[in-house]
Amino acid sequence: MAALNFGAFDVLSFDCYGTLIDWETGIASSLRPILAGGGAQPTDDELLEAYGRAEAEAERGAYRRYREVLATSARAVGRAFGVEVSEEDAAAFGDSVDDWPAFSDSPEALARLKRRFRLAVITNCDDDLFARSNARLGVDFDWVVTAQQVGSYKPSHRNFEVAFERIGLPRNRILHVAQSLFHDQVPAKELGLSTVWVNRRQGRAGSGATPPAAATPDLTVPDMATLADVALA
C-alpha cells in the first residue's frame, strides 16, 4: 500500500454516498421492485449503470433539490428498461435515502478518525436527507456542506470551494476521502487536494452508480476500516 503522510493533514473531508453510505444497495433495493412491477428485471450492474447516467444528467443545469433529482432519475431508469414509473413511485424513491444502509465499517472508522482529525463531509444531498443518513453514521462532523446549501452538485468545483471557505485552512492540510472518481476524485485533484480512494467496488466490473472517470488518488484502500488503521498507525 502506497505511503501517505497523515501527519500532514488536520482535516479529513468525506463524500457520503458510496463512501460511507452503501447507496448502491439502497438504490438497487428501492428501484428493483418498481422496475419489476413493470416487468423489467435488469441485473444489478445494468440497473446501477443506468442510474448513474440518469442521475448525472439530472444534476446538470439549474439546481434542483436532491429529492427531485432522485425522482427524475427513477423515471429515466424506468424509460431505459421500458417501464413507466408513476409519480407516486418516483416520489417514494426520492425519499428512499432514509433506507440506504451505512457500510458496516463506517461508524467505527469515523469515530476512530475523529479522535485525531477534524472531519468534514461534502455531499450531493439535501440537508434533511443527509441528517437521516448521518444518524446511521453516528458522528458529529465539524463541517457539513450539502448540495442544497451550495446550490450545485459535485463534480462542480463550487461544492469544494465552499468547504474550503468554511474550513479556513490551506488546501494542503485537507485530505479528501471518496469512492466516486467522477464526483470527487477528479475535481479534488483538479483543485490540488491530496485524496484517498475508498474503492468499495474492487473486484467488480464497471463503475456502478457513477459515470466512468479516471483519476490518480494518492492512496487507495478497500474500505473505511483500512483507512482508519493506516491513518492512525
Image (cartoon, rainbow, N blue to C red):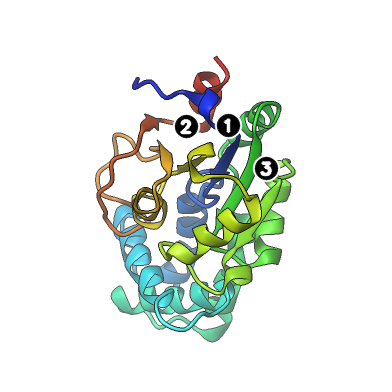
Residue 4 found in image quarter: top left
Residue at 35% across / 61% down in the picture?
Answer: 47
Q: Is residue 172 above or below residue 52?
A: above
Q: Residues within 10 Å of mark 3 (few under 14, many from 20)?
A: many
Would you call the spot at circle 1 few (<14 residues within 10 Å), some (14-19), or many (20 or more)?
Answer: some
Q: What label does residue 223 carry, if any?
A: 2
Q: Is residue 38 visible to the viewer in this orientation of the structure?
A: no
The residues tagged by marks 1 and 3 sit, at their Cα atoms, a distance apart of 10 Å
Tags 2 and 3 touching, CB below 8 Å: no
Residue bearing the label numbered 1: 105
Q: Residue at x 37, y 78 (%)?
A: 76
Q: Amino acid at mark 1?
A: Asp
Label 3 secondary element:
helix
Horizontal and vertical percent position of residue 111 = 69, 31
Residue 94 drawn at (x, y percent): 57, 72
- Residue 204 is situated, as x and y percent measured from the top left of the image, at 29, 40
The count of marks equals: 3
Residue 137: assigned label: 3
Task: Tell me which numbered mark, 1 or 3, is placed earlier along the sequence.
Answer: 1
Does any portion of residue 173 appear in the rendered image? yes
Quadrant of residue 92 within the rendered picture: bottom right
